[in-house]
Amino acid sequence: MTAGGAGRHRFAAALLALLLSAFALGGCSAVQGAASLPDTGAGAAGSGEVAAAGPDGTPAAPGEEATSNGGSSGDAAAPAAPGEGEASGAADGASDAAAAADNAAAADQLTVRFIDVGQGDCALLTCGGETLLIDGGPSEASSKLYSILKSLGISRLDYIICTHPDEDHCGGISGALNFASCGTFFCSVTEHDTRAFASVLRYLGQVPVTVPAVGDGFSLGAAQVTFVGPAQRTCDTNEGSLVCRVDLGEVSFLFTGDAGEESEEAMLAAGAQLDADVLKVGHHGSAGSSTERFLADVAPDYAVISVGAGNSYGHPADEALARLAACGATVLRTDVLGSVVAVTDGRDVQFQSTKGKLEN
């Protein structure tokens, strides 16, 4: 194995161990298979198997991992032979240094949890100790978000992006704010005549609502978040959804809220940078979003659809699914997979799911 290959092997092992032991939430369904980015020619590499995800998209509980080196968890270490202490100490020192390097790399990894909130949108992003919540699902998801943040020990959301004030995107944010404080709150509007949005504003307290301009952005740990839409303002809340891309190294995510054809065409005309490895599909996969021209520009390898099972809107629409298939994207649906978790180190991305399996 080359030095580079050994480094990647150590990182993969550390990443897997981190995911398996970080949070103690059990009772998960096993993931049978893994989805990884294909080689793009830009240094992205395929990833190996990943751990099962626990309830609400958190990694599996400790104790479910396989024992390394073929031994059982009860195996005792053999005593060192005479004269081996110095060599053993040197080896331990090298191992500690390698572990420290792996931990430093892991601290800069980006985790994106596409939380299953039924018929709504919600994503929780963490990187380098900083957190970003993009939408919160409907009001009935409030208690779920509260529980997830509590389980993860996240008492502060550095950033919240409410893509638009519709209840299925903003309603659950109140639950998040009931547990965690907010640093900066972004939204497409500063006021809206719905009880759900009014509740969010009450929980925000003195935190102002910031309406970002295209091109505005901020750092999330080692990742960069940039607003790329809407390219034109509109009274339609869906078409006025905030659209942002999140970049870490060579891997990018695009979050589109409920943007439809009107917003997509405006972004294309404005020359927005839309290419992304992972697309959060607009408007739950409605027929009026994810147009051919838009998908050709984004060219996603993966498309996550946040949607409720058996919803009355018929989401995702067959037309949208056909267009996603035609562009070669692997579709990951929360109504089928439950919460979907993506983890990237900026070179490749691994996926987990709370139920079902990931189809390549």
Image (tube, helix red, strand yellow):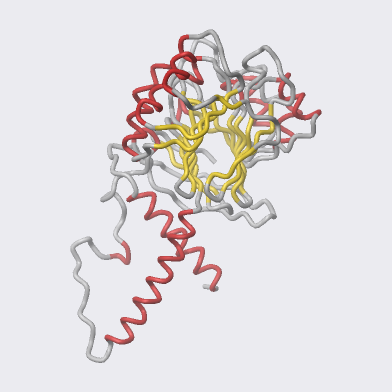
Q: In this orientation, does residue 350 appear?
A: no
Q: Between residue 263 and residue 290, name the one nearer to us.
A: 263
- Residue lying furthest front: 206
| Residue pictured at 46% horizontal, 9% vertical | 195
* Residue extending farthest bottom: 83
In the image, what residue occupies the spot 69% across and 28% down? 229
Q: Residue at x 60, y 28 (%)?
A: 281
For residue 271, what is the image quadrant? top right
Instruction: Give how far across and how far down residue 169 sits, in percent.
Output: 51, 20
Please give left or right for residue 26 compared with residue 172 in the image: left
* In this rendering, position of residue 67 left or right of residue 270: left
Residue at position x 46%, y 58% from top? 12
Where residue 351 appears, as percent x and y from the top left, is 48, 43
**Residue 80 sits above or below residue 173 on the image:** below
Q: Is residue 217 above or below residue 134?
A: below
- In this rendering, is residue 174 above or below 338? above
Q: Indicate the position of residue 265 as horizontal and vertical percent values.
A: 76, 24
Q: Is residue 36 left or right of residue 287?
A: left
Q: Picture quarter containing residue 17?
A: bottom left
Asked whether, in this view, residue 284 is left or right of residue 9, the answer is right
> Which of 2/266 is in front?
266
Does the rendering let one see residue 238? Answer: yes
Q: How many marks?
A: 0
In which quadrant of the rendered image does the C terminus lie?
A: top right
Q: Position of residue 177 (x, y in %)?
A: 40, 27
